Image (tube, rainbow, N blue to C red):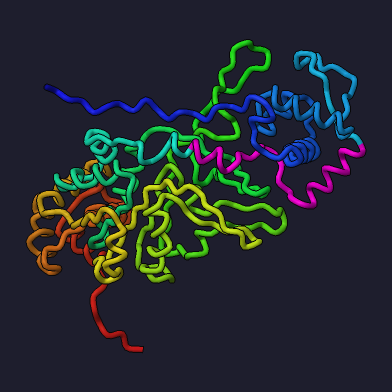
Amino acid sequence: MNMQAPQSTGVTPPPPPVDLEDMQLPLPMMRDILLKTMFRKNVTLVTEIAEAVCLPRRVTQELVDMSREQRLLEATGTLNANNGNEMGYQLTDAGKARALDALSQSEYFGAMPVPMDVYREQVKRQSIRNIQITRQQLTDAMGHLVLPPDLLGNLGPAVSSGRSILMYGPPGNGKSSISNGIRDAMGDKIYVPRAIEYSGQVITVYDPIVHSAAEVEKDDPNSLRRRVTFDTRYVRCDRPTVITGGELSLDMLDLVYNPTARTYQAPLQFKSSGGIFIVDDLGRQAEPPQSLVNRWIVPLEEGKDILALQSGEKFEVPFDTLVIFSTNFHPNEIFDQAALRRIFFKIKIDGPSQENFLKIFALVARKKGMPLDEPSLVHLLQNKYPTIDNVYANYQPIFLIDQMISICEFEGIPYQMSPELIDRAWANMFVKDEVIVK
């Protein structure tokens, strides 16, 4: 019987709130965000206000009506013929005073935040652990890479598990490219909150640098049919990928407090929820690798992270991230056995065989318009590589061909290979050990 892998039906979107009670946020907080947004953005129509605070029109109208009852808003008394004869609203003097007071406490305005407990439910609906990656998906995403045949067989189960992965091996063999290929294989979309509320505090999450927003059709206020079918306090995005390298430090994994705006920004691992967090070049950071992994132990094992507010109050947040550690060091050099036990998959990425090296060389040459030359390749394999014990790396074909292209362009000659050009390119790939007289 031919068994086919089940196809993903897509991520269930967060349902839009139906009324104010459905928001599960403190009423004074929602009212103040509404007033601050109207004050800062100078929006007057309910349609405009609803778009600015990312709420359905019905819920926004409830907020407007509540604010009118408190004499913080008033109708302008004029209908806007260009917007379906909507009534306009403006802040009263009391409303302006309240908006300014609220802004002095927190500069946050715009999209209404999502309560932490509500967000936890969405995390479950779009969990990285719900993904089932097939061999074909991984092959398609990494088709531009020449990989050993058993590597995909090791990577597939690791990715589908949503657990942590350690990739190790000599430098220049595509650990970063493989990490990016894993991201590309996922393919589906998730919903990232613009901001989250916890204990009355606002934590901004959506980050255009990290999150690649998908195109979403907007509602036409004059249309009877609704096109946007999810809670627009979220942004529909590709599964995020956060890549850090030698700059990673432990404090980058904490909430960032902005004392001027009096709001928080989510740390990197929180922004990567539902996606991938890649720690590249592990062992090159100022923090010892053991310390970095120790920081991840609870999140990796329990699926939750602990963050702290300025007040010192600690709270749990969901941790739903595929963490990929990538290092050029042997794991036994930088971790103790307890730490290694907590990293679920360990995958060695070796340099290519001579056969795969030649495949990569030919692929790169064709892509860059460099004609292959058999005597030059023989010279490279027989005279150059023996000097480094025939150790091949995936970066070398690109490096050598780019060097030869640069020389040809400088000399004003057509792209070509020759033993002499191979020698000149090779000289730039390694630095000869020698004593420099000062």
Q: Is residue 175 visible?
A: yes
Q: Nearer the viewer, residue 310 or 109?
A: 310
Residue 49 in percent (x, y) is at 73, 29
| Bounds of the magenta segment | 93-122
Residue 411 in percent (x, y) is at 30, 56
Q: Number of callouts in the render?
A: 0
Q: Nearer the viewer, residue 401 or 175?
A: 175
Q: To which quarter of the image does residue 71 belong?
A: top right
* Quarter of the picture holding the N terminus: top left
Residue drawn at (74%, 49%), measured in percent from left and top? 107
Residue drawn at (43%, 39%), measured in percent from left and top? 239
Q: Is residue 113 magenta?
A: yes
Q: Is residue 149 magenta?
A: no
* Quarter of the picture holding the C terminus: bottom left
Provide the major secondary structure of the magenta segment.
helix
Outermost residue on the right side: it is 93
Q: Is residue 404 visible?
A: no
Residue drawn at (54%, 39%), measured in percent from left and top? 119
Q: Nearer the viewer, residue 435 or 198?
A: 198
Residue 415 in percent (x, y) is at 25, 48
Outermost residue on the top side: it is 224
Q: Is residue 215 above or below residue 284?
A: above
Q: Is residue 268 above or below residue 368?
A: below
